[in-house]
Structure formats: structure tokens, C-alpha cells
Image (cartoon, rainbow, N blue to C red):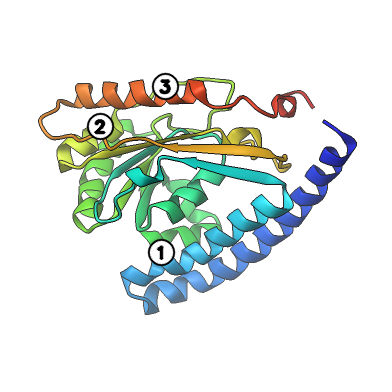
Amino acid sequence: MSLWESLRSWIGSAVFFVYYMLSTLLFGALAPLATVLLPKGLRQPVLNLHNKGLLFVFRVFCGVKIEFVGLENIDRRRAFVLVANHQSEWETYLLQVLMAPVSTVLKKELLSVPFFGWGLRMVQPIAIDRSQRTNALKQIISQGKERIEDGRSVLIFPEGTRIAPNQEQAFNKGAAMLATSAKAPILPVVHNAGYTWPGKRWRKFPGAIRVVVGPVIESDGKKTSELHDEMDAWMRAEMAKLPKGNEYIFND
């Protein structure tokens, strides 16, 4: 990493952190009022002003280029079970914007975080207790079907937690179970954002992120295991093709 890249990384990270805190405080403070006053159809667009701002500041000040492949696979007239690998916070903001309206499956503790959690409540997340796996799965299926019937896509990270880009973890079958139960298609997405916005790290890094949106995987006439295997195979194959950039972040 050159001196300029290192300096830009630290300065960009500081600028982003300040903006992140101010924007989260502002939108979090307004969220309870917005939830009461705004109809459901307007809540996601309002919260996405926050998401779009974060994505813009990250891209510009942290020196990150974004490449999209397969955007033509997104049909905004349909509600999907949206699945993506989970490497950082970046994709949680991007996918809210890319697939609006979308409800995210997340751990319930996040809703208790002041300001941040208040904003999350605006977009009807499916908040689960991960320590109660059986009940959590039932909740994902029942509430997920309700969201899809209401025209909202449901975002699931099948790894269950953030995984560094140089690691792998098995995908759980929750997305396939919801898709078969709701008779909804799966839309798979893969990316390598963990190299520029590492999970659980304050510092951001310059570089490039590639986002690949896969072809729709229809659930009609398929068993859960068959649908899961099809999703798993596509995501594994495409993740293996993603650029392995910015390896230095794991050694600094």
C-alpha cells in the first residue's frame, strides 16, 4: 500500500465515520415520527436517503469504484427472496436501495440500538432470536410470506453472519424454505465488498467492489433441497470468480 493510499484510507475513513454518525443520529431521531406519519410505501424511500448518502460518501471519500454485473436480472415488478453473501455492512445498505422495498432478516438485538435500530424499524425487518433456531425459522417463513404477499422482497444472508472474503461458511436453507413456502423466486447476489469495507473494522480501504446479480431461480415445482442446491452452486461458483483485491487489509 502506497503512502498516498494509506493516507487516503485514514482520512476517508474519518470523513465517513463523521458523516455516518451524523446521518444515523438524524434519521434515527426522525424515524419514530416518520413511522407514525408516513404511509408504509414512503418509509423505505425516506430511509434510503440515509442509505444512499452513506454509499455516496463511502465511494467518493474512501476511493472505491463499484462495478455491477447482471442488473438486468432485477424485475421491480416482482417480490423476491433476495440472497447475498455477507462480508460487511456495505451490502446491507446497497441492497436496501437496489431492491426497494425490501425487508431484511436480522438479529433482534439490532432493533434495540439507539437511533440505528429506530431507523431499521421503518422498513419492517424480520427480527429473529438466533439462539432459538427452530422458532426463528418458523418466524422467517411466516413473516417472510406476509412481506412477499405485500409486495416486499425479503433479504436473507444465508451464511448467517459476516464472513471475511478469504473464508467460507455453509449456507443455511432458510431462503430456499421461504421461497418454496411462499412460491417466490430467489434472486442471488454475490460481491467482494469485504476487501474495502471489512466487517467489524472502523477503517475503510480504497479499491473496487464487484456486485454480480444472478439470474432468477424459480421455485415452482422444486423441492427445498433442490432449490437450495441450485442457489448454493451459483453463488459458490460466482464468488470464486470475484477479484481477490486489497489482501493487505488482513495483515496491517
| SS at badge 3 | helix
Q: Earlier in the sequence, mark 1 or mark 3?
A: 1
On the rendered image, what quadrant is the C terminus found in? top right
Q: Is residue 122 left or right of residue 242?
A: left
> Front-most of 179 and 146?
179
Q: Which mark is residue 176?
A: 2
Residue at image position (76%, 23%) is 251
21 in relation to 176, above or below: below
222 in relation to 79, above or below: above
> Front-most of 221 and 242?
242
Instruction: Report x, y in % for residue 91.
Output: 51, 44
Picture mark count: 3
71 in relation to 27, above or below: above
C-beta proximity under 8 Å, tags 3 and 2? no
Q: CA distance from mark 1 to mark 3?
A: 31 Å
Q: Earlier in the sequence, mark 3 or mark 2?
A: 2
Q: CA distance from mark 2 to mark 1?
A: 25 Å
Q: Earlier in the sequence, mark 2 or mark 1?
A: 1
Mark 1 = which residue?
Answer: 44
Instruction: Report x, y in % for residue 55.
Output: 59, 54
Q: Amino acid at mark 1?
A: Gln
Mark 3 = which residue?
Answer: 236
